[in-house]
Image (tube, rainbow, N blue to C red):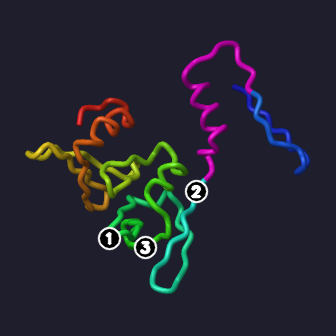
Amino acid sequence: MKVEIHYVNSLEEECAVLEICENHPGIIKLQEIIQKGTYQTLTIPCFLREQIYSISCEHILYFETIQDKLFVHTGSKMYEAKKRLYELEEILSEHFARISKSVIINLEHVEYYSPLANGLMKATFYNGEETYISRKYLRLLRAKIGGKKL
């Protein structure tokens, strides 16, 4: 497929035009990516002691609320952010999923899922950290990761 890029004046609205002979799921996915802007890297302002950081969502393993505070886990550090989980759900890409009342995970950093005896599931990240998926969110997570058996 040929790709052309034409630069426009900054006052003009950017627009992507796809000339296709037939519609298929890949084109629909591409359209969603362009319209939602999920190709852009989202950063979350975070705090560690008195320092302010801008953490790229690519590096975030999961978000967790504990006693009305939002913690951002990157694998090597844990930051605090001034957002609520419902606010994050609205802006995060499809690579993130809510797995409990207090946790949103980055699906790209999960190495594997394990069933537990009490009906819960455990998500283990590539760095060895673990978090738990509640039964309430399990069906939504299955759908999000493509119906794979969990």
Give the amino acid at mark 3.
Tyr
Q: Give the residue type that dot 1 points to.
A: Gln
Q: Could you say whether the residue bearing mark 3 is in a helix, strand or loop?
A: strand
Q: Earlier in the sequence, mark 3 or mark 2?
A: 2
Element under disc 1: loop
* Residue drawn at point x = 59 percent, y = 26 percent: 28
Q: Give the range drawn in magenta.
A: 18-40
Q: Is residue 55 above or below residue 4?
A: below
Quickly name the residue at label 3: 79
Give x and y (percent) for residue 108: 41, 48
Give the mark, 1 or 2, whose residue is nearer the N terminus: 2
Q: Does the magenta stretch include residue 146?
A: no
Query: Toward which corner of the image does residue 37 lie, by quadrant?
Result: top right
Q: In screen coordinates, is 100 left or right of 51?
A: left
Mark sitting earlier along the chain (1/3): 1
Give the residue pinned by disc 1. 67
In what quadrant of the picture does the C terminus appear?
top left
Choose mark 1 or mark 2, whichever is in front: 1
Q: What residue type is labelled 2?
A: Leu
The extreme top residue here reads 22
Residue that extends furthest to the left in the rendered view of this protein: 117
Query: Which residue is at the front of the view, 37 or 84?
Result: 84
Residue wearing tag 2? 42
